[in-house]
Amino acid sequence: MNNKLQGKETLVLDSREAADMMEVNHWEVLRKLEGSKDRKGYIEILTDNQMVVSDYFIKSSYKDSSGKKNTCYLLTRMGCEFLANKFTGEKGVIFTARYVKRFNEMEQALKEKEQPLKIDSKFMYQIAQQLEEKESRIAEQQKEIEHKKEVIKGVTDDIDIYTKRNVLNKVVRYKGANFSERWNELYDRFREVHSVDLKARCKGYNMKQKKKKDQLSTIKYAEKFGYIDELYKIALKLYETDINQILKHLQKIA
């Protein structure tokens, strides 16, 4: 892995990975670095002799599966060499081979990262075409959105509340539509947009009425408490064609 040390990018190896390479427990590596009650660790020895510990070992931490924070160290190449020298026999040879290979892999990855990206002219042309097509699609979508805004404005301005309620009642039944499903769809969309559950509020209102004649349907509740305008706008988006036809018919018989 890479680590920023004094403004420079330094390749380091996590002490847990080093322990795996050495085929020992991580705590054994920590004990060698930090020492124990009766024995100085490498870090203390280096410090006592005014050596720069971070040239070899950089203290760090990690969280285990339970979320507990534990100590680990980031080992520089010199730190790995330091540990390898303390290992004798086959284990020392294997650890040296493994960490040398690991650092070579990290160095190669760093070189590839620093190399400038080479892009041929054909690839650049394809990217330009894709961007142009995307911009064209966005422009078309924007035109469609603006058109819908004009349509909504054109059929909502200068229409009174009574007419809007009348249109809502007609559109849910228009051309044999399932009016129950359309009411539910309309109220559900209103709840999503405005975070207001009209059906639940109407039910709560009716529970407080002592006389049955004072109870309201959901649409009349919406009218009484000023929700018709927004409800009508949502219906227009859901059933735009149907509403336009209803309004044209109303204009003819007006």
Image (spheres, rainbow, N blue to C red):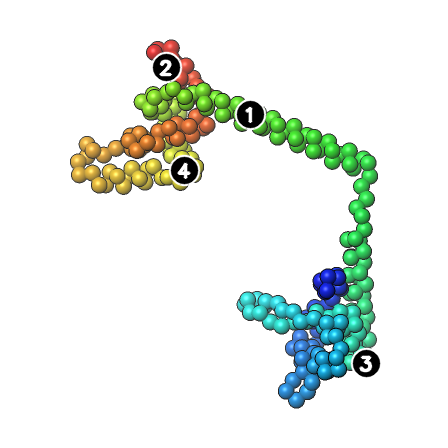
Q: CA distance from mark 2 to mark 4?
A: 29 Å
Please, what secondary structure does the residue beneath circle 1 have?
helix
Q: Is residue 187 above or below residue 144?
A: below
Observer-side mark, 2 or 3, equals 2
Q: CA distance from mark 4 to mark 3?
A: 74 Å
Q: Which residue is mark 4?
A: 194
Q: Which mark is residue 250?
A: 2
- Are the residues flagged by discs 4 and 1 in contact, CB closer than 8 Å? no
Residue drawn at x 76%, y 64% is 11
Q: How many numbered callouts?
A: 4
Q: CA distance from mark 4 to mark 1?
A: 24 Å
Residue 100 in view in this figure: yes
- Are the residues flagged by discs 1 and 2 in contact, CB closer than 8 Å? no
Taking depth in this image into account, of 222 and 6 the one nearest to the observer is: 6
Please, what secondary structure does the residue beneath circle 4 have?
helix
The amino acid type, in three-letter code, at marker 1 is Glu
Q: Which residue is mark 3?
A: 89
On the image, the x and y values in percent for residue 197 come to: 36, 39
